[in-house]
Amino acid sequence: MARFPGRSWAPSASGATGSAGPAGGRPYGRHQQPPAKRAWPVKRRSVAGQVFALQILVVLLLVVAAAVALVVQSRNDAEHEARTRSVAVAQTFANSPGIVDALRSPDPTAILQPKTQSARIMSGVDFIVVMNNDGIRYTHPNPARIGHKFVGTYQPALHGQVVTEQTTGTLGPSFRAVVPVYAPSGSVVGLVSAGVTLANVSSASERQLPVVLGAAAGAVGLGMLGTVLIGRRLRRQTHGLGPTEMTRMYDHHAAVLHAVREGVLIVGGDGRLLLCNDEARRLLDLPPDAEGRLVTELGLERAPEELLTANRPVTDQVLLAGERLLAVNVRLTDRNGGPPGIVATLRDSTELLALSGRAEVAQRRLRLLYDAGVTVGSSLDVTRTAEELAQVAVPRFADFVTVDLAEQVLAGEEPPPGSSLGRMRRAAVAGVRSDAPFYPVGAVLNVVPATPLAGTLYSGEPRLEPRLAEAQGWREQDPQRSAQILAYGVHSLARVPLRARGVLLGVARFWRADRAEPFETDDLALAEELVSHAAVCIDNARRYTREHTMAVTLQHSLLPRSLPVQSALDVAHRYLPAQEGVGGDWFDVIPLPGARVALVVGDVVGHGLHAAATMGRLRTAIHNFSTLDLPPDELLGHLDELVIRIDQDETGGGESSALAGATCLYAIYDPVSRRCTLASAGHPPPAVVGPDGRVEFPELSTGPPLGLAVLPFETAELELAEGSRLVLYTNGLVEDRARDIDEGLELLRAALTGLPRTPEQTCTDVLGALLPDRPQDDIALLVARTRVLTPDHVAEWDVPSDPAAVGGVRAAVAERLAAWGLDEAAFVTELILSELVTNAIRYASGPIRVRLLRDRSLICEVSDGSSTSPHLRYAATTDEGGRGLFLVAQFADRWGTRYTATGKVIWTEQPLE
């Protein structure tokens, strides 16, 4: 037997006064109820009957609406289906195989009549008629109509259109369609018409009406069953519940309501207090006549009054009522169809106030430590890390923070040994105001012995000065400054030494002025946590600064200190290291024999000491290869082999290592011919700025980067007008994270376009237009303006392969030197040329040519068609020859051999001063 809430199973009043049955109690007394109580079942049945009648009415209305909608929909669907089916069947039959041949046959009817009858039966249409272009029928369901003219509209179909029309015949309303039959050439050779009556289509839709009526009958049955079940449920819920049981149930509820340790209030929709228990009266200090009055008239504080009149649900909202901390829950009573109003419960959480306060403080400290872990150490900069420590603690922990570090730490060096610091420099100051009388950033602090500051540094333990005004020892560090700090209102201090990995780096001091409470022991533990994390970050930044300084020093020592003196080019350069890290970009200007100059720009992959060291090795190798006077493509080939060997050496031990790949652009400019020969190993192309300000990026055959050995390198030749500017650069100038290389090249073109400028001004303009705010890569820029060695500084002679021609060459050379005012150099020059020309005539092949160049030095060149290079040797005392080249080497300042496409050139240089 089910038991219902609030029911009491004690004998009823009537059972108690009437005759008791054998079992006694309620079952027997149920039949002794007064006759007046038996009117309830009739009333319930009348309510159930009304519900049932309403359900029947709703179902009938739905059935009628569904039937009407079905009929209308059936009519519309039938018309659409008839039109669609007639068109589909006509088009399908018009496009069926063999119909064109049948129309062109002598007897189309004999071929098509059986096919149309079969297709009509299978497709469910009433007729399929095939006719010629004049409308004469070839087929019809009634053979008597074959040969007669089609009745209806078919002319548009002769022009390729699909004709549909509705007609009313003996079978009722119908739809028919006429479609053309196309020959392979695209011409219309006949027509096909198909038709279907609405009655044939709509019969399927109308068969759904019984289903709807059956569903309606089912709904009526379900409604009847639901009504019966609801009536039985109502009877079971209210059966035998008399006044005694209702009174007892109310007494039980009242006892529970007033006994719980939780305040309960019920407020009606009009804002009046309907019910409140004793606990609610106590917690809110309600007057005795509170029930029935408006909540706004009860004299409540603002916070609880707003909650009770807001008419919105609330879950565990904590508010302060007098000296009590209350947890309030509010629920609306009209959410499930109940009367408007609210039910509010109140819990006294005053005892949890102290615990929640301590939990809130702990939460704030944990949040501060988390923020410090995220913020402090965001960069590998010592000063910036000290500033982050000071800023994260203000104002959540202290009103002012000062951070002092050893001067060696700021410079990235090792801090002084020992457990104390005698000299520090202020690295950071942060505070709620900027007018505090603390030492500014950069000020030097000499630690006075025997002061609390010195004791903190020596012991390595944090110290507190909770009341600065009462402490005396800290003033000895700087009495005047200490007096200013006290006068400013600073009243509490916490000192924490900065130690990391057993090394003392400095000290952080936390000051309070605006906040009234002084520092406590718990605050000192928090300060120590903050400083310990910052100390590790500062030490990491110090180590990085030291390594970065070493790498930068190494890098700058490997780059050219100054450019060599030469006359072929007017050169300016810029080198800018990356914001963080050291790269392997480099540039070079190398004088070559014959007044020529080599320009080099390169970029080693990666950053750090490895890249800088690799850059130095490659730069040295290029200088060595350039002494051999190799063409650019051959020089890059040798350099590529060197990079491969470097990679093999570094990975030979089995350890994984990044490849020492690099890019390089090598160019040789000849001021006599004004030709520039270039070769590139994966490097961006140079920019050539003509004297008129026009900028071009010459098309070079860009080879692979150094270290890949995939393809051979190729050279390109440019003829440059005098005053042209050749701009070489690394990819850090034109490419970064914010722009791609194409955009960078266009910006470079715009910066170079315009009036002629000096190389120095060109460098300034280019960097001003393209330099990023924080360069992520090194930038090397080399700008060279071309000069020309004029014809009056050049002399050339062709020499016959006859020893007698040596005298004529000597005379011509002496005459030209006299014209140049170099009579003093005539003897030595004649001696050098006599030996070189004689050797060429004797040992080499023609053609033989002599060239004199007057530049910063006097250059003598003898070219021939042989590729055999002479070798300097020392003749014995008994030898009659072999001393010529030795004399040339003694009289000339420099001499050497370079190879050309047709032979070689022996050259010498003689100083003119």
Image: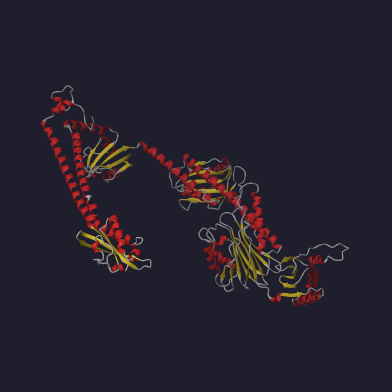
Q: Is residue 62 above or below residue 566?
A: above
Name the image colouring. secondary structure
Q: Quadrant of the C terminus?
A: bottom right
Query: Looking at the picture, how far across and down is residue 909, in whole percent?
Result: 75, 68
Q: Quadrant of the N terminus?
A: top left
Q: Nearer the viewer, residue 852 or 827?
A: 852
Count of residue discs: 0
Q: Nearer the viewer, residue 569 or 195?
A: 195
Q: In screen coordinates, is 837 left or right of 352?
A: right
Q: Residue at x 18, y 35 (%)?
A: 235
Q: Residue furthest left?
A: 35
Whether residue 411 is visible to the viewer of this picture, yes or no, is: no
Q: In screen coordinates, is 867 left or right of 765?
A: right
Q: In screen coordinates, is 555 left or right of 307?
A: right
Q: Nearer the viewer, residue 524 or 27?
A: 27
Q: Residue furthest top?
A: 22
Quarter of the rendering containing residue 780: bottom right
Q: Nearer the viewer, residue 261 or 695?
A: 695
Quarter of the rendering containing residue 361: top left
Q: Is residue 437 above or below residue 809?
A: above
Q: Is residue 259 above or below residue 546?
A: above
Query: Looking at the picture, how far across and down is residue 646, in whole percent?
Result: 66, 53
Whether residue 447 is visible to the viewer of this picture, yes or no, is: yes
Query: Looking at the picture, how far across and down is residue 229, in whole percent?
Result: 20, 37
Query: Looking at the picture, how far across and down is residue 163, in whole percent?
Result: 28, 65
